[in-house]
Amino acid sequence: MANLGDNCLLARKKRYNGRMHSETEHRPVVLAIGGHDPGGGAGIQADIEAIGANGCHPATALTCLTVQDSCNVSQLMPLDAEHLTAQCEAVLEDCTVSAIKIGLLGSYQAADGVIRLLKACPRIPVILDPVLAAGGGSELASEQLLEKIRDQLLPLCTLITPNTQEAVRLSAGGSSISLDQHAQILLQLGCGSVLITGTHDESDRKWVINRLYQADKQTLIRQYPRLPGEYHGSGCTLAAALAARIGRGESLENATQTALDYSWSCLQQGYRTGRCQSIPNRWFESHSNNNR
Ligand code: PLP
């Protein structure tokens, strides 16, 4: 682990000696840690687009490469965990990072490296999208990785954004308890707040119901009309938008509202590039300007 210093206890190696930036030029930096999807629907590319569209600068560190198309993931190739932490350290030593977004970790070793790094940066908000399986069904997390996330990563997170299936798996509370009870277990495991998204809960055909749980606060419920079809990278889009909004200093409640509104619009204006899942249109605002 690198030297200890200020913002995140990681020392700034380089100081910028050039022209000072004006207020309007300032863009908060959000570090996205995740995997690469060559189809550009999910993973780091989704993060770059959503963080940029929400007014922040995306810095990125790759955990793994994948082979996948719009239907499913067929291969996952973890990158060396030391290279992963070196990528993160290079960003953290150079920039003031306003939020860290974590997506697909891809290996136990990557999780271990990220956990050590987060412990050295206790003041940076951490938003975790616990990616456990691909939309097409492929497993993306071993039992060992799941336990590592549950026991050691969750306590370092400001906010986690599981869908209903991920919430059930992560809490390990079994299938007989309610969603509220799963959320309470996740809070007790130590994360600051839990946003359970309703995209994968098809018991309600008309609405997607999202619930934000915070200790000692009333659950915030936000529902959106359920859109037809399936989307690749919707979870990444939401968590990255949340990280950008939190990185810009919005309260958790405001960030939740703006990021959910943004993500729903991305899906509503989504488009198809391949045979299966659609891609969220994360640039819908600039696309509509270009078409004028
Ligand atoms: N990140 C990568 C690299 C992936 O391959 C996937 C799913 O396949 C995800 C994240 C999660 O995608 P989604 O937001 O659709 O859950």
Image: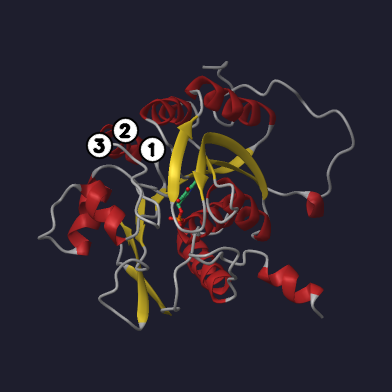
Residue that appears at 41% across and 50% down:
159
Residue 50 placement: quadrant = bottom right
In this rendering, which labeled residue sits more in front, label 3 or label 1? 3
Residue 216 shows in the view: no
Where disc 1 sits, the SS reads: helix
In x, y percent, where is residue 242? 52, 57
Q: Give the amino acid type for the residue marked by disc 1 in the picture.
A: Leu
Q: Is residue 130 above or below residue 82?
A: below
What is the residue that sits farthest to the left in this orientation?
176
Count of residue discs: 3
Q: Amino acid at mark 2?
A: Gln
Relative horizontal placement of residue 288, taking residue 257 as reference (left or right): right
**Residue at the image point whose x is 47% and y is 64% from the top:** 256
On residue 152, which mark appears? 2
Give the structural element (helix, strand or loop) at label 2: helix
Query: How packed is label 3: few (under 14 Cα within 10 Å), some, or many (20 or more)?
Result: few
Mark 1–mark 2 Cα distance, whole angstroms, equals: 7 Å
| In the image, the residue with mark 3 has its CB under 8 Å from the nearest atom of ligand 1 | no
**Residue that badge 3 annotates:** 143
Between discs 2 and 3, the one toward the N terminus: 3
Location of the C terminus (image quadrant):
bottom right
Q: CA distance from mark 2 to mark 3?
A: 14 Å
Quadrant assignment, res 224: bottom left
Q: Looking at the image, which residue is at 39% across and 57% down?
A: 136
Q: Which residue is mark 1?
A: 156
Would you say 96 lies left or right of 130 here?
right
- Label 2 vs label 3, nearer the camera: 3
Q: Earlier in the sequence, mark 3 or mark 1?
A: 3
Report whether the residue tagged 1 is closer than 8 Å to ligand 1: no
